[in-house]
């Protein structure tokens, strides 16, 4: 059966909302969700919720346990290492490919986003931190023209996003170098290799902080 525009639009809206919750860590690893509760919260029927969750399951972001319940996969050391390796392969390259397309407007936006991220850490605003960190990276990656590369990176963030809040939970207690500022300096200098290195270091520092202090911890933030 062919879906009409209204139905397709609703399905897409629900899907985009759940994607946003995943990449910004508002759904924690191991957390179980019910299609009924999500539908009630969003004010829609369960059908578009099931449609969205099926798409997210195909992308590895959730696992469907029954018709009415889904689970955000728990993080394991093996999966963590796999995601880290994939991010390090793809994201620095995407940033370097974006470099020729980054203009003064992009620079202003990146500086504004990084300032919001720093303010979020100081104020203890986990949601603002997650949103700003995601916005910084994807402002870079979306500037390049290779859509398949972008889609692969988006899939990685869907899978790792639920775990990303541990970076926020631990960053305020760690003295990490501001690799976003280093990336901005590399963009200003037109230095693709320095930009690659800054993004790789940013990924390694954040994920390395989790690896060094343990994958599971009591400082995981509730959603």
Image: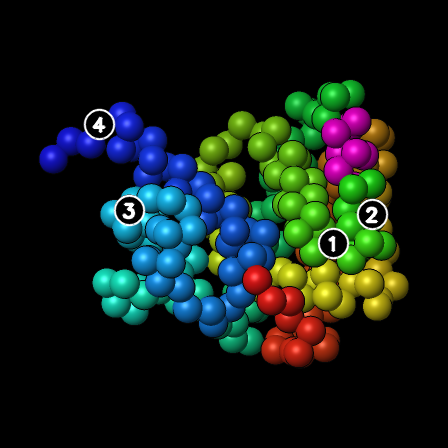
Query: Could you tell me which residue is drawn at 32 percent across and 58 percent down?
Result: 36
Its colouring scheme is rainbow
Asked whether 51 falls inside the magenta stretch, the response is no
Q: Which mark is residue 125?
A: 1
Residue 112 within the segment the image draws in magenta: yes
Q: Which residue is mark 4?
A: 4
The dot on residue 119 is 2
Report the number of numbered marks: 4
Residue 105 image point, x, y percent: 74, 21
At 27% from the left and 25% from the top, the residue drawn is 5
Residues 45 and 32: in front is 45
Which element carries disc 2, helix, strand or loop? helix
* Residue depicted at 54% across the width and 27% down the height: 145
Among the two numbered marks 2 and 1 on one chain, the one whose residue lies closer to the N terminus: 2
**In the image, residue 192 lies at what x, y percent?**
74, 36
Q: Toward which corner of the image does residue 191 lie, by quadrant?
A: top right
Residue at the disc numbered 3: 45
At 65% from the left and 40% from the top, the residue drawn is 135
- Separation of disc 3 and disc 1 at Cα? 32 Å
Tags 3 and 2 touching, CB below 8 Å: no
Location of residue 69 with respect to 44 vertically, above or below: below
Secondary element at image label 3: loop
Which of the two discs, 4 and 2, labels the residue nearer the N terminus?
Answer: 4
Q: Residues within 10 Å of mark 4 (few under 14, many from 20)?
A: few
- In the rendered view of the protein, which quadrant contains the N terminus? top left
Let me know if residue 83 appears in the view. Answer: no
Give the residues drawn in magenta, as a range.
Answer: 107-114
In the orientation shown, which residue stands out farthest toward the left? 1
SS at mark 1?
A: loop
Q: Nearer the viewer, residue 45 or 128?
A: 45
- Find out whether the residues at labels 2 and 1 contact each other: C-beta distance under 8 Å: yes
């Amino acid at each position: 059966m062919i879906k009409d525009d209204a139905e397709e639009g609703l399905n897409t809206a629900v899907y985009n909302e759940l994607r946003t919750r995943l990449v910004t860590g508002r759904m924690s690893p191991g957390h179980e969700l019910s299609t009924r509760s999500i539908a009630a919260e969003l004010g829609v029927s369960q059908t578009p919720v099931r449609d969205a969750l099926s798409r997210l399951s195909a992308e590895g972001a959730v696992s469907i346990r029954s018709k009415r319940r889904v689970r955000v996969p728990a993080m394991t050391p093996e999966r963590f290492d796999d995601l880290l390796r994939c991010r390090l392969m793809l994201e620095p390259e995407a940033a370097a490919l974006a470099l020729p397309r980054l203009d003064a407007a992009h620079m202003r936006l990146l500086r504004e986003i990084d300032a919001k991220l720093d303010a979020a850490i100081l104020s203890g605003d986990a949601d603002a931190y997650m949103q700003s960190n995601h916005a910084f990276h994807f402002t870079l990656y979306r500037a390049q023209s290779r859509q398949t590369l972008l889609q692969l990176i988006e899939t990685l963030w869907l899978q790792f996003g639920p775990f990303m809040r541990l970076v926020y939970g631990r960053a305020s207690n760690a003295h990490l170098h501001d690799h976003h500022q280093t990336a901005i300096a590399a963009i200003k200098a037109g230095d693709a290799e320095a930009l690659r290195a800054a993004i790789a270091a940013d990924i390694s520092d954040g994920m390395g902080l989790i690896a060094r202090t343990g994958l599971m911890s009591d400082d995981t933030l509730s959603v």
